[in-house]
Structures are given as structure tokens and as C-alpha cells.
Amino acid sequence: MNNVTIGDMLLQGWPVLSILLVMSVLSMAIIVDRVRVIRASRLNARAFVSKLTGILKAEGGERALEFCRRYNQSVSAVSLEILLQPGKRVARERALQHAMQSEVKRLEEAVPILGTVASTAPFVGLFGTVMGIIKAFASIAANSGGGPEVVSAGIAEALITTACGLLVAIPALAAYNWCVHQVQALMTDVELAVYDLVETLCPDED
């Protein structure tokens, strides 16, 4: 009886496994990039805005702009847009929302691809499973009366592609949920903090 090794399984399922490999490499590259970008965008929003409003009151708008430009975090980018927006409260709040949307877009760039990988990888693995089972039944038909070794290669392909599909999908799904949650939490903190800046700039407006 022939023994089917892991290498045999990989060899039998290489067409589907190559697709899963590409999906895995793509998702890992996105995960590493988004973790780096999101962590780099974190800053104590309330402390930043508190210091910014102090500079604005004591030293004026130019020094406040200079202070914002020193940083490359979400709260500094949103605050800068508010300071650069002339006009009354409505205009500044509109600038706030536009800056918030721009930051969310920047932070979530390529994150939807993770969701796509997470949702499609199991189906790609399932496709490999179906193909493996088809090969197993074809082997039975071609070798009537044969033993388990006749279908072992097809079953091996079915099992390995299913496992690899899940192996690709689970990290992608976890990373997608983490990224979305982190961006939402970060931008909520920024939005709550920068309203203090709007109040400082437009204290007498309803």
C-alpha cells in the first residue's frame, strides 16, 4: 500500500494551493502595513488638543499651525484642517468631517481586501476539495476493485486544500476585524477631542 506524504498532498493540490498562497502573501503584506500605519497614527488626542488650544490662545494661529505640522498623526491632521478652514462654526465642522473621512480612508486603505480574502479563501479551498473528490471517484472508476491507495491521492488533495483555505481565511478575518475596530476607536477619540478646538475657535456661536 502506498503512503501519501505531505509533499504528495501539496503536489496534488498545487493549482488551488498556488491561488491560496498568493492570497496569503497579499493578506500578510496588508496586515503588516496596516498595523504599522494604525499604530503610527495613534496619539493622545485629548492631550494634543489641550496643548494645541493653549498654544492657540497664548501664541496665535501661526504657532498653532506650526505645532500641528510637527506631527503625522490623525488628530494633528484633523486639527490642521480645522485651523486652516476660515469662516464660522458650520464651515469648521464641515472641515472636521471631511478631514475625518480622509483619515478613515487613509487608515483603512486595502483593508477591504482582507475581508475579501477572508470570505473567498474557504470557497477556494472548497473548490480544491471538490476537485480532489472528483479525482478520487475517477480513480475508483478507472481501477475498479482497487484498494485505498487508488483514492488516497484525491482524498489527500481534498483535505489539504480545505485546511489551507481555512488557514488563509482565519488570520485575514481576524486582521480585518482588528483594523476596523482600531480605526473606529481612534477616530472616535479624535472626533471627541477636536470638538474642543472648534469650541475654542468659535466660542460665541451656537
Image (tube, rainbow, N blue to C red):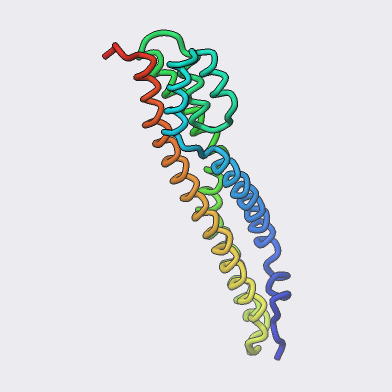
Going 58% across and 59% down the picture, which residue do you hit?
168
* Residue nearer the viewer, 58 or 132: 58
Classify 130 as above or below 204. Answer: below
Query: Tag count in the figure?
Result: 0
* Residue nearer the viewer, 53 or 146: 53
Q: Is residue 129 visible?
A: no
Q: Position of residue 176 (x, y in %)?
A: 50, 49
* Residue nearer the viewer, 79 or 162: 79
Q: For the N terminus, give its image quadrant.
A: bottom right
Residue that extends furthest to the left in the rendered view of this protein: 206
Classify 60 as above or below 131. Answer: above
Residue that extends furthest to the top in the rendered view of this protein: 87
Q: Quadrant of residue 69?
A: top right
Q: For the C terminus, give its image quadrant.
A: top left
Q: Position of residue 144 (x, y in %)?
A: 64, 86
Q: Position of residue 137 (x, y in %)?
A: 60, 76
Classify 23 as above or below 97. Answer: below
Q: Position of residue 2 (x, y in %)?
A: 72, 87
Residue that extends furthest to the front in the rendered view of this protein: 58
Going 45% across and 9% down the picture, which residue do you hit?
86
Q: Is residue 5 visible?
A: yes
* Residue nearer the viewer, 141 or 75: 75
